[in-house]
Image (spheres, rainbow, N blue to C red):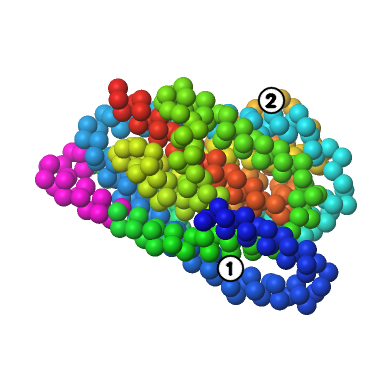
Amino acid sequence: MIMFALGLGALAGIIVNISVSGNVGAQAVLNTLIDTIAHPVGQIFLRLLFIVVVPLVFASLASGVAGLGDISKLGKIGGRTLLFFLITSAFAATVGITLLEVVRPGDGFDPAAREILMKSYATQASEIQSKTGTAVATGVLGIVNQILDMFIPRNITKAIVNMEMIPLIVFSLLLGAALTKIADEKREAMIKWLDSLSEAMITIVGFAMKLAPIAVFCLIFSVTARFGLDLLQKLGIYVFLILLGYAIVLFLFYPILLKILTKRNPIEFLTKASPIMVTAFSLSSSNGTLPTSIRISETVLGIRPKVASFVLPLGATMNMNGTALFEGAVVLFIAQVFGVDLSISQQILVVMLCVISSIGVAGVPGGSLPLLMIVMAQVGVPPDGIAIILGVDRLLDMGRTVINVMGDVVCSAYINDSVMES
């Protein structure tokens, strides 16, 4: 039903966009319709999912670590999980850069189209750039304090309010590790409470999923009705190449990993994981998809709760393969549009920066854009050039979220089938 609503919403939006084109009155009515009906319905669905993210990540991670019993297992599982994240992100970023370097769609980009896009999205680009102000530290002490604040802030509640997931993950891991060191009866009582909280959050997700088909229709309709196909025509090759990169990772790279590391049937695995992919595509949020990822992984994919509750919340914050691919491709594309020639060493630097920056990306729609501007600035590409691609970013954001989330699911299958057996 969600897939049907997705296609129907996209088709309806494109038809309406074409129908009202050039008619100011009809366009105003359409905008009112989107703002008063489609947007609220979509937001109710999104917020029902976002509202459970913090308690779900806290409960599932802490319970997962505490349930391991032997704290030494955490180092083994955690080390292999992080290594998997780094390798897959580096591969994805390399795919994005390679595709854009081979085809070079930014060369010869229409200057008139570039100016129109820059003007249309100049305000939005400025807002994104303003978010990078606190992200750049100067001096050794400033960098050290920035890293400390990223992982262990002085005020954990403030970090949670700001939806900064890395401090929450660190706190949850510390709590889970501490629970393994206390008396058995106290540990078991706490684990039962954490499991009950996690199950309650999953139940709330069930409430939201009853609204999912209608909400997905509204979300997709809002995007396609406002922007139509005009932007896709101007940026068609760029969009196609990034979508091709997503396809390479999802349908070639991940199946190879599944076959080699887990001995599972890749086609069967991806088919069973389709509800996760549809939810990720609809929400454009790794955090928003997390409840669905945990539920499907445990009940359909046969991944043990101890593994799913550790790997998936961690991956929703730290494993962003699709984001790494997207960032590398965008940097090259905008460099080509503005005539900035990046050397091989600079492209390698871009890959490294994309992997590092993707770890700190917020798992919400558009969360990668502020950090992407920092990466662009590091290699001499104009950061405000990001305005060129903002019009089509919603579509690409939906796609990269699928890659991000499925990378987490594949990793959890690897940990479940190999590491936990040894």
Give the magenta-colored segment's residue range: 179-198
Residue nearest the observer in this picture, 90 or 205? 205
- Relative horizontal placement of residue 103, taking residue 97 as reference (left or right): right
Q: Please identify the dominant SS of the magenta region.
A: helix
- Residue 194 among magenta residues: yes
Q: Which residue is mark 2?
A: 345
Q: Please determine whether, in this image, residue 235 is positioned above or below residue 355.
A: below
Specify few, some or many for label 2: CA neighbours under 10 Å numbering under 14, 14-19, or 20 or more.
few
Q: Which kind of residue does numbered mark 2 sit on?
A: Ser
Task: State the image coordinates of residue 333 (x, y, percent, origin top left).
Answer: 75, 39
> If the image is split into quadrants, where does the C terminus sit?
top left
The image quadrant of residue 32 is bottom right
Q: Which kind of residue does numbered mark 1 sit on?
A: His
Specify few, some or many for label 1: CA neighbours under 10 Å numbering under 14, 14-19, or 20 or more.
some
Q: Residue at x 53, y 63 (%)?
A: 215
Q: Which residue is mark 1?
A: 39
Residue nearest the observer in this picture, 365 or 416? 416
Q: Please determine whether, in this image, residue 372 is positioned above or below residue 30.
A: above
Task: State the image coordinates of residue 262 (x, y, percent, origin top left).
Answer: 41, 26
Q: Please determine whether, in this image, residue 323 is positioned above or below residue 261.
A: below
Q: Residue at x 85, y 52 (%)?
A: 113
Q: Secondary structure at mark 2?
A: helix
- Residue 152 among magenta residues: no
Image depth: mark 1 or mark 2 in front = 1
